[in-house]
């Protein structure tokens, strides 16, 4: 499986394949973001789009990443992940290597409680609970 960073100039070719994969992640929390907002974020550089390609199958997974620069760390935040077999150790290792090459010192994602055990198997640790209120 090969990891690819999708630049905006390649979006017209890749987006029709990646969007349905990401939409499945959006469907888990439909009030959080729309696929159109994700596309806009990738096109403007707010998000980075990574895709995984399986030999003989083509693109099988997609993830959007943004970077947050904090005083002590550069955090790579995975927003959406979707596709077949995307949560596998070697896929995470490739993605983490890409994050490091882009200056990240930490990686994180937000998830619902039922997904915590899956991410813990990948080496992530639960560090915070997100509390939210409508304004």
Image (spheres, helix red, strand yellow):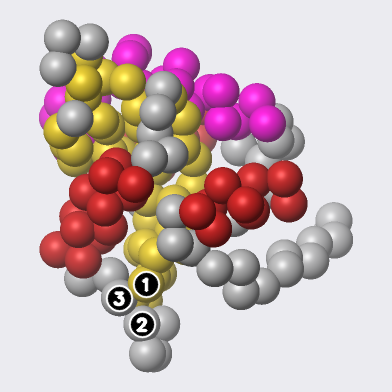
Tell whether 37 sits left or right of 114. Answer: left
| Side of 64 relative to 117 (left or right) | left
Furthest toward the top, the residue is 56
Image spot of residue 48 (x, y percent): 30, 46
Q: Residue 22 in magenta?
A: yes
Return the residue nearer the eye: 93 or 132. 93
Which dot marks residue 79? none
Q: Residue 105, labelled with which disc?
A: 3
Q: Is residue 119 left or right of residue 83?
A: right
Between discs 2 and 1, the one toward the N terminus:
2
Q: CA distance from mark 1 to mark 3?
A: 4 Å
- The residue labelled by disc 2 is 73
Q: Do callouts 1 and 3 mark residues in contact (Cβ within 8 Å)?
A: yes
The local secondary structure at tag 1 comes to: strand
Asked if one can make out residue 18 in the rendered structure from this viewpoint, the answer is yes
Which range of residues does the magenta coloring cover? 6-28
Nearer the observer, 14 or 37 = 14
Secondary structure under tag 2 reads: loop
- Residues at marks 3 and 2 touching, judged by CB atoms closer than 8 Å: yes
């Amino acid at each position: 499986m090969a990891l690819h960073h999708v630049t905006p100039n390649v979006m017209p070719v890749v987006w029709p394949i990646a969007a349905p994969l990401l939409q499945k992640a959006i469907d888990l929390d439909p009030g959080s973001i729309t696929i159109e907002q994700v596309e806009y974020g990738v096109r403007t550089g707010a998000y980075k789009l990574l895709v995984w390609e399986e030999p003989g199958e083509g693109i099988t997974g997609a993830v959007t990443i943004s970077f947050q620069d904090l005083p002590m760390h550069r955090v790579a935040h995975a927003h959406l992940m979707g596709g077949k077999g995307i949560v596998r150790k070697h896929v995470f290792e490739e993605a983490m290597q890409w994050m490091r090459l882009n200056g990240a010192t930490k990686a994180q994602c937000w998830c619902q409680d039922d997904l915590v055990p899956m991410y813990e198997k990948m080496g992530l640790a639960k560090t915070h609970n997100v509390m939210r209120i409508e304004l």
